[in-house]
Image (spheres, rainbow, N blue to C red):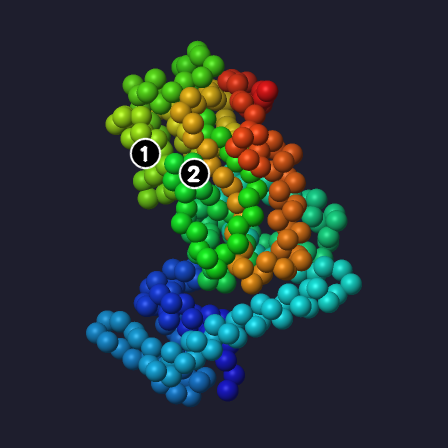
Amino acid sequence: MDLSLARLRMLRELHRRGTITAAAAALHYTASAVSQQLAQLERDAGTRLFERRGRRVQLTDLGIVLAEHAEEILAAVERATQALEEAGGSVTAKITAGVWASVASGLLPDALTTLAASHPGILVRTTELAPESTAAAVRDGTLDLSFVLDYSNYPTTWDRGLERAVIGVERIHAAVPAGAVPAAGVTLAELSEHPWIIAPARSHFGHAARLAFQSAGLRPRIDHELEEQATSMAMVAAGLGVTLVSDLGLALRPPGVDIVALGDALTRTVSLAYRTNSAGRAALLLVVDAIRTAAAKKGLAPDIRTTPTVRRTSDAAGAQETE
């Protein structure tokens, strides 16, 4: 019997999530691809692992037995990988990481360049995902680690099977058309007459923004719902509204946009998530340290109590003044 680890991982996800569609989404495959691979797994096992109940596929008793063993097998593979990395004279490993635009552009270039110089045997591969999806991809074994977010008014529910390493705290600022707000600071209420460009409510950023509006007793006019901060600021530069932007997002600011300090205290904590059973993996911890160092160089405070104040800036290059 020759059982593929990739197919065992699909079986595990079907057992965890209950449907092929949900398992496929977690693993970033199509449902058709997962169905085909599970059918091959059944042939490899030489026994019936699945049965149809209406439109759904369910595990047989033997399927459940194999799925439970799959958990142990995949955990053992991870432990073996860690042991091999630690046994070598130098750290050699391949690490897969989940990212999104602002951390990929703001932190990874410096972090990975430094890491390559000091530990050339560590190869980091990245996959861009929505911030809401990265932790699940780590838990499922698709990724080794990922960036995750907690907003000060909307903390993320944490999975007990994951560890979290705090990278830094980002402030949230107002991004407005150049010259639209002459003051050094502004509140959400003072921007209430402007049309808004905000992430959709299904996203963490969009939900946190709407909670901030609600806390201020506001019902803003939202003309555009966009996922990426860079895209939102491009709309701001065109005079189509105002938006919110994080510290790392400032690097993506185009000409024609002013960044104004937001009087409504809203921050978000950037962390890295990795599986608890990977907590001793030397290569993974070296990646975490490299990203923390890059964050410190960018001025991200490790704790909100040490976060510097940002003053308004309107230069085209997007420089920040801090005190």
Q: Nearer the viewer, residue 285 or 244?
A: 285
Q: What residue is shown with label 1?
A: 210
Q: CA distance from mark 2 to mark 1?
A: 12 Å
Rendered location of residue 104, percent (x, y) = 55, 43
Look at the image and tell me whether residue 106 can be seen. Answer: no
Q: Amino acid at mark 1?
A: Arg
Q: Is 122 placed above or below 32 here?
A: above
Q: Which structural element holds mark 1? A: helix
Q: Amino acid at mark 2?
A: Tyr
Q: Residues within 10 Å of mark 2 (few under 14, many from 20)?
A: many
Of the residues under marks 2 and 1, which one precedes in the sequence?
2
- Left or right relative to 322: residue 9: left
- Left or right relative to 55: residue 89: right
Please give the name of the residue rendered at 45% of the width and 17% of the height, measured from the top-left corner. 185
Q: What residue is shown with label 2?
A: 151
Please give the name of the residue rendered at 51% of the width and 74% of the height, measured from the top-left corner. 72
